[in-house]
Amino acid sequence: MPPNVTDPPIYHDPQIVFNETEKNHQPPTPSSAAKDVYNLNIFQSSLNQLAHILIGMTVGVILLFALRNGLPVGATPQHIILCVLGYHLLMAQAILSLSPHNGWSSRLKLVHKRRAHWILQVLGSGLALAGCFIKILDKSVHWETLHGRFALVSMVFTSVSMVNGLVSLYANELRGLRLLPSLSKLTHICFGIVGFSAASITLCYGLDKAFFRSWASDNFTTAIIVFVATFTTIIIINPFITFFNKSRILFRNN
Ligand code: HEM
């Protein structure tokens, strides 16, 4: 045979040729640890998606309730609309925006994520606090119901969390002040978790009021309360993990 002629392939069955080629080009099989990480990521993304659906349904139903008699609305519906939009739409999104599994923010650069977070946080807290003050001014006796008392807790923690959120925003510039930036970030996360959880408990007590139950029926009200509990748990998982990781690093380094 002349030197520039190659041997013909030895396989005659095309299926065998195909299978052999596939075998040679197969990517390496992932290790079981990589598979676990992949499964955990899919699980967390699904939880995130579930939280968005539950937030949408809850906020939608409460807006329908508050607007059931049309416009203009009185002090109580104004209070309900502002509190729910502020706490459970905007502040919920503000917390979710920092989660690596959150759909709309996962592709943002860190600097843009943080910008989205503080804008949503300021808008959300502003609307929620305005909603609370509308109802406080509408009432003459205060904090005699569990709904009111939890609302007070959420107002205090939300306000404090906003202030040290500002300090956290300038944490890089304040690096010279030793522990202050790390502590302000930790307290911002901690107060944010308490403020948001207290707002969710307040919402559940609000939904438990007779006028909501008689509009929505008992079973549906229970379902919405379960929705609130579920999305609140999903939303605070990520800040909880960040809080423990950051405190571990802080105490290990000092
Ligand atoms: C996150 C959501 C909510 C927050 C933060 C919130 C906050 C508040 C605050 C601060 C007060 C005044 C408490 C006082 O002065 O003693 C109040 C009262 C009231 N809220 Fe809400 N509220 C929320 C949702 C709702 C919902 C969903 C309803 C009804 C469906 C509702 C119905 C009422 C009523 C009827 C009062 C007057 C009676 C009371 O003090 O318990 N609220 N709320």
Image: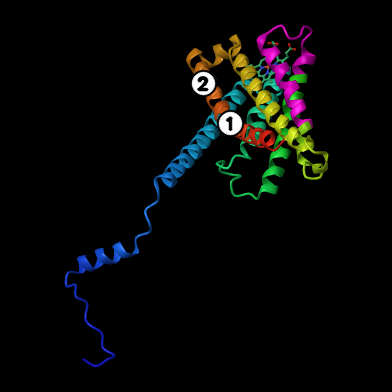
72 with respect to 178 (left or right)? left
Identify the residue at the far left of this view. 12
* Residue 84 visible: no
Whole-percent x and y of residue 52? 55, 34
Q: Nearest the camera: 145 or 167?
A: 167
- Residue at x-position 58% and y-position 42%: 100
Whether residue 161 appears in magenta in the rendering, the answer is yes
* Residue 226: image tag: 2
Disc 2 residue crowd, few under 14, some 14–19, many 20+, Cα 10 Å? some
Disc 1 residue crowd, few under 14, some 14–19, many 20+, Cα 10 Å? many
Q: Nearest the camera: 239 or 134?
A: 239
> Is 44 placed above or below 58 here?
below
Whether residue 137 appears in magenta in the rendering, the answer is yes
- Report the magenta residues as a range: 134-163
Q: Which numbered disc, 1 or 2, marks the residue closer to the eye?
A: 1
Looking at the rendered structure, the secondary structure element under dot 2 is helix
**In the rendered image, which residue does mark 1 sit on?**
235
The amino acid beneath tag 2 is Val
> Is 125 placed above or below 112 here?
above
Looking at the rendered structure, the secondary structure element under dot 1 is helix
> Is 65 placed above or below 18 here?
above
Whole-percent x and y of residue 53? 52, 33
Whole-percent x and y of residue 99? 60, 39
149 with respect to 58 (left or right)? right
